[in-house]
Image (tube, rainbow, N blue to C red):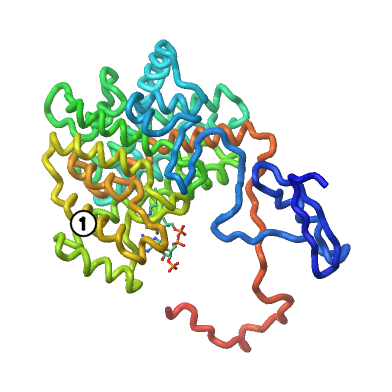
């Protein structure tokens, strides 16, 4: 018998099946042949929250969660963060290779020339309530772009797909900055094509009456590094949403809006905003032990700690700590850092966290840097969505080129009742469900 196989005996029937093992997986569809009778549907796997299910083949991002390794297209994240710009990494993620000098110049020029948004989109944004959360505005406005570019639905046309990819990468910072300006009541600032991707974003966020915005180079580089670290992270909640929505052949604006909505949750990209709230709530270094006890007693989670995949240090958290030092030399030290460091120190020694392999994740320190740089906490998840758009689009492209992919459609185990007798209105008992 071939060694790369799995032999299963169904004790219900006594029959034995041999399934191929490829890349450390068995195909769930191979289980379907395991039946107890001809009219049996066949064996399925049950995997709530995809704890142990590969949903695709991908050559974009490699993670070894036990060893704390993260690579984009085979390049370690540490190397890319040190040597590349964000748009260079975006090119790598999308096209598989680092660009040479002329390719990069052309790529940057193309992205730079798609940063403007249509006037109707600007007016659309003006309609948001004065205190709308920037992430809600971003999600809705990105979805609305599908009405501005109806041709985007031609998802099988490669040139058309690429055009939408460039538009999305270029317009995310513009929409993000406008969401912020709207929430603080400042007039919108138009993109400046002389500036780099991150400098221009800072310009659109913070330019006031000065004729030309000059970004601090250390802060612009720090933001670029943070964008590199957030650009992709294989099959997480939002990327799975991007692929799932995209699998119905929805246009990329609708798919990115859905992915961004998934990112907004506090257990995913929304965690960085929650970390700041938590540090505010803790207040001082001295209150840290009591807060940790509070978490251990089952009252909430330590935000910015834990990860589905990393059961060791998140390699991005280390780079973020280094970047924080550079930023604090310009902005001064964020006093919340001391609380965060104490929290990390105690948590990493505490049996509860050690046993569960809970380490600081990317969101633990990013919020502290962002705050020192002048970003409001409400903008933190938006700052995550801008670079992650690149990862979502790379994964979306890969999905469209993968002949094995079809519309995503999981199975279920039905647990409800069957074939109930209809009850006429006058005989029904009040179920009291609306009183809750
Ligand atoms: N604080 C305290 N306890 C925690 C934490 C935490 N941050 N994270 C997990 N645990 C505990 C769980 O209560 C559980 O304990 P139990 O075994 O006694 O029931 C155990 O550790 C395992 O946790 P799960 O929730 O099963 O792990 P899962 O892989 O499903 O969740 C997640 C991962 C969602 C990231 C979780 O660790 C969490 O909620 N962390 C806080 C939110 C956060 O920082 N999210 C950002 C993640 S990074 C990103 O998305 C960019």
Screen quadrant of the C terminus: bottom left
Which quadrant would residue 80 be assigned to in this image?
A: top left
Residue at 14% from the left image edge and 60% from the top image edge: 284
Say which residue appears at 17% left-offset and 24% top-offset: 214
Report which quarter residue 160 is drawn in.
Answer: top right
Q: Examine the rendered structure and indicate whether residue 435 appears above or below residue 29.
A: below
Task: Find residue 83 and report its horizontal and vertical position in percent.
Answer: 34, 24
Please state which of residues 428 and 60 is positioned toward the viewer in this rendering.
Answer: 60
In the rendered structure, the answer to whether residue 366 lies left or right of residue 248 reads: left
Marks counted in the figure total: 1
- Is residue 118 visible to us here? no
Residue 75 falls left or right of residue 126? right
Residue sitting farthest toward the top: 102
Place of residue 110 in the rendered image (x, y in percent of width and height, measured from the top left): 41, 18
Pointer 1: residues within 10 angstroms few (<14), some, or many (20+)? some
Label 1 SS? helix
Q: Nearer the viewer, residue 339 or 170?
A: 339
Mark 1, ligand 1, within 8 Å: the answer is: no
Q: Quadrant of ligand 1?
A: bottom left
Residue at the spot 60% in from the left edge and 36% down from the top edge: 399
Residue with the most extreme right position: 38
User: In terms of image quadrants, where is residue 220?
Assistant: top left
Residue at position x 20%, y 63% in the image: 288
Residue 97: percent from left, percent from top: 49, 22
Q: Position of residue 300 (x, y in %)?
A: 33, 67
Q: Is residue 198 visible?
A: yes
Q: What residue did someone put label 1 on?
A: 342
């Amino acid at each position: 018998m071939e060694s790369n196989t799995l032999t299963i005996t169904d004790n219900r029937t006594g029959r034995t099946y041999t399934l191929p093992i490829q890349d450390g997986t068995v195909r769930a569809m191979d289980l379907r042949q395991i039946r107890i009778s001809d009219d049996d549907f066949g064996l399925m796997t049950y995997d709530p929250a995809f704890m142990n299910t590969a949903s695709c083949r991908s050559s974009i991002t490699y993670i070894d969660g036990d060893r704390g390794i993260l690579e984009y297209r085979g390049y370690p994240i540490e190397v890319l963060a040190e040597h590349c710009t964000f748009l260079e990494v975006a090119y790598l993620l999308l096209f598989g290779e680092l660009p040479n000098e002329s390719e990069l110049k052309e790529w940057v020029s193309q992205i730079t020339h798609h940063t403007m948004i249509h006037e109707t989109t600007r007016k659309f944004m003006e309609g948001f309530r004065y205190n709308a959360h920037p992430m809600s505005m971003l999600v809705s406005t990105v979805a609305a772009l599908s009405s501005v570019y109806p041709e985007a639905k031609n998802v099988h046309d490669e040139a058309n797909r690429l055009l939408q990819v460039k538009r999305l990468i270029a317009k995310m910072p513009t929409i993000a900055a406008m969401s912020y300006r709207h929430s603080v009541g400042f007039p919108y600032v138009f993109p400046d094509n002389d500036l780099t991707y991150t400098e221009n974003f800072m310009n659109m966020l913070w330019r006031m009456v000065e004729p030309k915005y000059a970004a601090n180079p250390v802060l612009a580089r720090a933001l670029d590094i943070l964008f590199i670290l957030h650009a992709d992270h294989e099959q997480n909640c939002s990327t799975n949403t991007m692929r799932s929505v995209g699998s119905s052949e929805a246009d990329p604006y609708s798919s990115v809006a859905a992915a961004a909505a998934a990112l907004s949750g506090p257990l995913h990209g929304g965690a960085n905003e929650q970390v700041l709230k938590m540090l505010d709530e803790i207040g001082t270094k001295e209150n840290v032990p009591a807060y940790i006890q509070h978490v251990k007693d089952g009252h909430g989670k330590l935000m910015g700690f834990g990860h589905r995949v990393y059961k060791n240090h998140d390699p991005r958290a280390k780079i973020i700590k280094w970047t924080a030092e550079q930023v604090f030399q310009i902005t001064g030290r964020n006093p919340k850092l001391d609380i965060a460091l104490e929290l990390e120190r105690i948590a990493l020694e505490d049996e509860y966290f050690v046993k569960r392999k809970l380490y600081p994740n990317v969101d633990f320190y990013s919020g502290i840097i962002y705050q020192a740089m002048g970003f409001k906490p409400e903008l933190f998840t938006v700052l995550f969505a801008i670079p992650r758009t690149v990862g979502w689009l790379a994964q979306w492209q890969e999905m469209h080129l993968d002949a094995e992919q079809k519309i995503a459609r999981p199975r279920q185990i039905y647990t409800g009742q069957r074939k109930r007798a209809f009850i006429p209105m006058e005989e029904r008992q009040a179920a009291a469900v609306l009183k809750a």
